Image: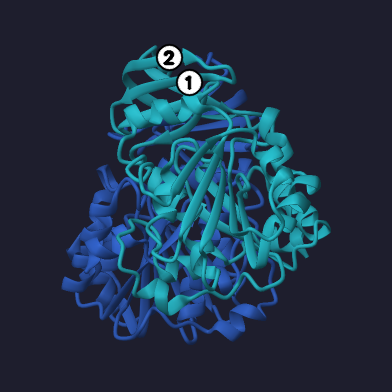
Chain colours: A cyan, B blue
Amino acid sequence: MTLDKNWYTEEWAGQGSAISLKIKNKVHDEKSPYQRIEIYETETFGTLMTLDGLVMVTDRDNFIYHEMMSHPTLFTHPDPKRVLIIGGGDCGTLHEVLKHKTVEIAEQVELDERVTRVAEKFFPELCESNHDPRARLHFADGIKWVADAQPGIYDIIIVDSTDPVGPAAGLFSEAFYKNCHRALRPRGLIVGQSESPLFHAELIASVHRSLKSAGFLEIATLNFPQCAYPSGWWSATLAGKDGPVSLFRSREAATKTFTTHYYNRDIHAAALACPEFLRRLLT
Amino acid sequence: MTLDKNWYTEEWAGQGSAISLKIKNKVHDEKSPYQRIEIYETETFGTLMTLDGLVMVTDRDNFIYHEMMSHPTLFTHPDPKRVLIIGGGDCGTLHEVLKHKTVEIAEQVELDERVTRVAEKFFPELCESNHDPRARLHFADGIKWVADAQPGIYDIIIVDSTDPVGPAAGLFSEAFYKNCHRALRPRGLIVGQSESPLFHAELIASVHRSLKSAGFLEIATLNFPQCAYPSGWWSATLAGKDGPVSLFRSREAATKTFTTHYYNRDIHAAALACPEFLRRLLT
């Protein structure tokens, strides 16, 4: 079959494959100083945001990504108080981070203020915590932010970035990880989205090598489904400045007082399991 | 963007979404007595088989599905000797089942002989065990096969079916599960593909209810990624005739002597973790 003009299609770069979502209409289209931001109302995925033609977030399935970019890392850290989010302009990760009562300050450094302003209008539920007194939104270059950061200031750094091309490429480099390592307190953790295990296993291996070279002690990749991202399967790679990442506060995860839709204690442990092909590549 | 005629597209029924694979050429097209069978050479997914226009198997990602339809169940059973596969015409599941040395007989009951003959030609690696002396290929109606089966003859029944529409609908019914229950030996297990957790959570809940009504003691759903199936996330539901399904021979899974590409002991345990939204639906 051929899809008509009522479909939005993203070709998964270099993968000879594509996903399409049926749209009702386009409700926003702008060129910010950094990228083209488009918003569609889809037939079954709710609202869709794309950046330069790539799917960033849909109402229907963003819960998995945002929960997995935050809760495993927050429950791995013994007492997370100060969190830095690089990117994350739709504010969904920030919203999840602030569900943790231990967090005193969550700073978000997004390059493109327009992404956040558009998200506030079209994804209000993701932006519900933007005015939490613990939230601090900055619009700046995350790479420079971390390079300039006071040493040992953050407990957790979350890299909620776009793909490792263009401005986001530097967020996957050893130089960036070294700066993150320095900006973290003892027992600090970094986590970054690390693309698809099926499509980008080599990238994941390279992220592991760079984190190791940058001084991180233990590294693990979390796997989770993400329908609207390439291959429908996604990952985040977690590293500990000087401590383990395979143990977590499982009792607290099991008795958490906030609601999630994907994450729970068992899912946390499950996400750490490494598929055989990836295990072979990483060892 | 719009995809040209060099793409194969499957619209995910009722889900306002679709996947496309870029094709080099179509190498086979026939109408069997049951369905249309097409084979394409794709650009990056190797060979693709579709039945009535729905993706069944690609070279690139079938390993996850076939391993997860077999090894978790085989390693859950204490001593699987006789296995029945309903459907499974591409023979990939049969190939995985026969990696287990305890298996003495693996019977496969596929409705459409042409699917198997076409798979033998275009997916030879999936059919490598078709001539194993323990393999018995039957081309018949699986629903009738189980209804007529001798009571207590099988250790494991694997339902490797198409979607629950048309001829496969009966493979999701309580009546069918009752016949399976009778055909299983004590400690016997049934596992069936149960669609996408994201798209078909209600179906999974209904499968749980039907298995329970049919007399199965314990039921669990296994989750795993499957790029080319709807939502990129798939499931299999496993049930025990009179025993548990959450425990497995983990030491033997960890020291297995055959090669897998997705499955290992940790992945087995991980697949049993139930996402929060599904847990709420199932309890």
Residue at point 53%, 14% (across, down): B5
Q: Which residue is mark 2?
A: A29
Q: Mark 2: which secondary structure?
A: strand
**Image quadrant for the C terminus of chain A?**
bottom right
Q: Which corner quadrant of the image does residue B13 belong to?
A: top left
* Badge 2 amino acid: Asp
Crowdedness near tag 1: few (<14), some (14–19) or many (≥20) residues, C-alpha within 10 Å: many
Contact, CB < 8 Å: mark 1 with mark 2? yes
Sequence-wise first label, 1 or 2: 2
Q: Is residue B139 visible?
A: no
**x, y (%) of residue B164?**
28, 48
Q: Nearer the viewer, residue A198 or B150?
A: A198
Q: Chain of mark 1?
A: A
**x, y (%) of residue A149?**
69, 48
* Direction from residue B236 to residue B122 in the image, left or right: right
**Image quadrant for the N terminus of chain A?**
top left
Q: Nearer the viewer, residue A90 or A43?
A: A90
* Badge 1 amino acid: Ile
Q: Mark 1: which secondary structure?
A: strand
Looking at the image, is B273 positioned above or below residue B3? Answer: below
